[in-house]
Amino acid sequence: MELKQLTEYIIKKALKEGADQVDVMAVKSTTNEINVRLGEIEKLGSASPKRLGIRVIKNHKNAITSTSDFREKSIDDLVSKTVQMAGFTSADEYSGLPEKGMQGIAAASLNLFDEKIPALTTDKKIDMAKKMEKIGMSYDKRIVNSDGAGWSDSVATYVLADSNGFYGEQTMTRCGLSLSLLAEENGVKQTDSWYSGKRFFEQLDSIEEIAEMAAKRTLRKLGSVKPETQKVPVVFDPQAGEDFLNIIASVILGSAIYRKQSFLLDMLNQSVGVEGLTIIDDGLMKDGIGSRLFDDEGLPSCKNIVIEKGILKTWLLDTYSGKKLGLRSTGNASRGVGGNPSPSTSNFYMEKGIYSPDEIIRSVKNGLYLTSVHWTGINYITGDYSRGAEGVWIKDGELDQPVQEFTVASNMKEMMKNIEMIGNDLEFRGSVSAPTFKIAEMTISGK
Amino acid sequence: MKRRDFIKTGGAVTAGITTIPLWLDNSRALAEGVNVNIPEVFAVSKKEMRKLIGVAMSNGGDSADLFFEYAVNSALQMEENIVKSASRNISLGMGVRVIKGDQIGYAHTDDLSFEKMAEAAKTASFIAKNKTRVKIVDINPVLKKDLYKITDLSVDADFQDKLKLIERANKAAREFDSKVINNNVLYFDEMRHLMYYDSKGRYFTDIQPMTILRTYTITADGNNRQGAGSARAGREGMELYHRQGNTPEEIAIEGATIAVRNLQAVNAPAGPQTIVLGPGESGVLLHEAVGHGLEADFNRKDLSNYSGQVGKKVASEHCTIIDGGLYPNLRGSINIDDEANVPTETVLIEKGILKGYMHDEISANAMKSPLTGNGRRQSYAHPPMPRMTNTYMHGGNYTPEEVIASVNYGIYAKRFGGGQVDITKGDFTFGVYEAYLIENGKLTAPLKDVTLIGNGPEVMRNVTMVANDPTFSPGTWTCGKNGQRVPVSVGIPTTRVSEITVGGTN
């Protein structure tokens, strides 16, 4: 059965068995993965997985199931089981599908599919990975080892159908190249990596660019020292900035607000950052990694200004969290096939400023250029920030000594109000993007 | 991100672990639990498996294996005093691996028709290119351990029984203190049915159970808010929650106590401090500072800071560190690993001296080392890698009280959200969400969430006292590496480290 017929069949059957509302999400994809290390193929992987999820609402009670087994008998049993499970849970007046009138597919032309990707041969992919690794390895004699070069690609078709009569289908491609290198100097080894991931093959960075970045980032760490404990200005590079934005992305979701798990709770329409801080979520960005025509509840994607000139303007909402907060969905519903919808960002970015990254670095007499943070050490309720970090020390406006094995700490609420300069170097490398920016003061804990 | 291998607990209940399965055609078989006829579940004959191995090795190669998995999980989530969601998820599929030296071809399918499986086998075969005739050995079951004694099967347990657990936990947290403003509870269980066959004729079936009960409590005092949680997990059934220390009330009160106490928390100091690690959860230190660096794939490739260090002193003489998947019912325990080798008790470090690494088949062959039973995979969609199971440190001679009393000024770190390590340089971090100042040998003020950072070998050399209370953390540790997640356990006695950098603001 085609996905469209299958979803129609499931919806009909679930309604017949007593469901008040039902939706079905199905995903079919093809993925390829190649790892090459030291000139040899390390791993060739390939698969065509599929999965569907069934969500049933009955008397305001909710249940969800999913399976990779699409045989008719299995599907029939699962539909019955899902309806039966919905009898077990508690009635929740806010549960349910979106209003029919709110659903639809955005009237935009989004480029999400590249026909070149399925046509690429395995040999071509292997060849690119091998060449890229070779270029990286020969960049500098201090590069002594490789953790491999990788290629990956996927073509995925997403289908969403529900008992309101909504049906949407979108097919998206992705491809990526990555390289991880190891350098050694004075008996100390350092490693780093670089990657490029896009929806279109032609948009990937060249293998030369990726190899050079991977090499430079690895070499930059050689000779790292542990910095002194002190309070200094911190310049976030775009990678560290992406982490900073990811924290904000977690606490402006409707789900975090009604659960009271956000340090920005009660701050709607108030000042949460400096005037230069504008943060946008745009589900309709052309070629965007996070772009889509409709969200996972069938609402058209749109562009939401979350923070405008320092003022928190909106939460990102799905239908449920919207109802809980007395608001309408912002078209940000997202779900795994077997999970309930909850709000999530699409393409989330900080608007660029006017300074060049160089100007920002030059403005710091003694401080940190932060290039990488470890994932632990955020309290989303209080905003307390204490993260393991790596970077380069700034001395008299110049990048000087690489630094490692220290933490950088503050509180997110203070950090957002202490952004001093925002760079003009915004680039959309993934679904969360930031330019370089400077925070006036943070605590470095080192020696 | 590849180098960023990490371990973490589930965090907030609300993080969205709601992907859970059920069997359809075989609900009868499942209800019989551990007695289920696994080959029947997959409906694949032994003859067909031999044929598939033949296809997988049609281009040559050293060996090939088939890994079948049928996983069913279920979850119930309570939030705002109501059960908002019930979920149940099913995964069925198989993976084919062809090994040639240290190269692998891997393909998987969720369609178990012979045609689709043969297609996967053909795809995996492309890694090898020399058409040598390969002998396929007939099926020969391998002996495995029997570590998961389930007396009270959970996946198909009565819904009302699970609901009772959740309600008890929720009630206990809500009634614990008037400062509690919200409480979430997640109940999760899973049964993984596995079947394996390889070109050496080795064959096994296994059923891996898992159960988790987790709470997360939010507290408020004026504008000041905090949140903390607690959890229990293990390879067993509902009986886990009947034992003292693991009842829903005890789990909920543990988390709520921290959430209330942290309302009084003060900023942690910055800079190097003496640390006393509490028993159990602090084992995440070993997982990050030592464990990942001793997984043999990183050493075979000379990527680890422990590469080439066997026989050398890499930690203080107080440290004897073990990894073993063979302790009954622990989250990281396995009857047999995912390439048909039984788990062993692997001494990684003995009195400070590095003794060996944790291996899968590829690394053991390449390094000519004995197998340790550490070849694990997340699912049928993933090839095995050397992974930790239950990693812990032996106890020493001091009492825990003596260790704390020995510190004039320092930090007592008790509960951890997770950690991360750079395997090559050895730098690791771990996040602490329950910690106290130690002043004049006594625990004083609770500290706000803080990150500790250090270099693995340096920190292990700074271990100066180890107490006689070795403990496994009963929590829900999940280890991530190269995009694959597997359940593990960690353990440690109360341990004094003379210096770790503390990421506070004071």
Image (cartoon, rainbow, N blue to C red):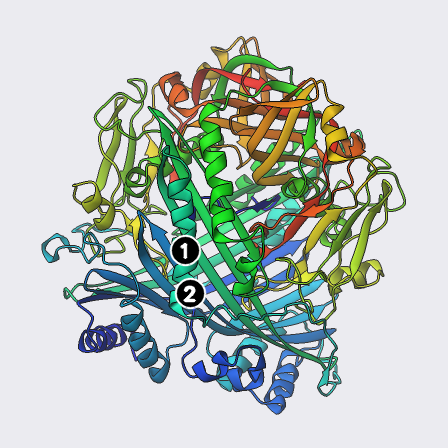
Query: Is B135 situated above or below B502?
Result: below
Query: Is B501 situated above or below B384?
Result: above
Circle 2 — which element? helix
Circle 1 — which element? helix
The disc at residue A42 is: none
Q: Quadrant of the N terminus of chain A?
A: bottom left
Q: Amino acid at mark 1?
A: Ile
Q: Position of residue A313 (x, y in %)?
A: 22, 30
Q: Amino acid at mark 2?
A: Asp
Q: Position of residue B284 (x, y in %)?
A: 65, 42
Residue A51 seen: no
* First in residue order: circle 1 vs circle 2: 2
The disc at residue B166 is: 1
Query: Is A166 situated above or below A196?
Result: below
Residue A417 seen: yes
Mark 1, chain letter?
B
Q: Position of residue B46 (x, y in %)?
A: 62, 89
State the image quarter where residue A175 is shown: bottom left
Same chain check for tags 1 and 2: yes
Q: Is A292 on the left or on the right of B442, as rendered? A: left
For label 1, count other residues whose C-alpha is less than 10 Å away and answer few (under 14), some (14-19) or many (20+): many
User: According to the image, label 2 marks what residue?
Assistant: B161
Q: Foreground residue, B327 or A367?
A: B327
Q: Is B496 on the left or on the right of A352, as rendered? A: right
Q: Is B378 on the left or on the right of A119, as rendered? A: right
For label 2, count other residues whose C-alpha is less than 10 Å away and answer few (under 14), some (14-19) or many (20+): few
As measured in the structure, the alpha-carbon distance from the residue carrying label 1 to the one carrying label 2 is: 9 Å
State the image quarter where residue B414 is shown: top right
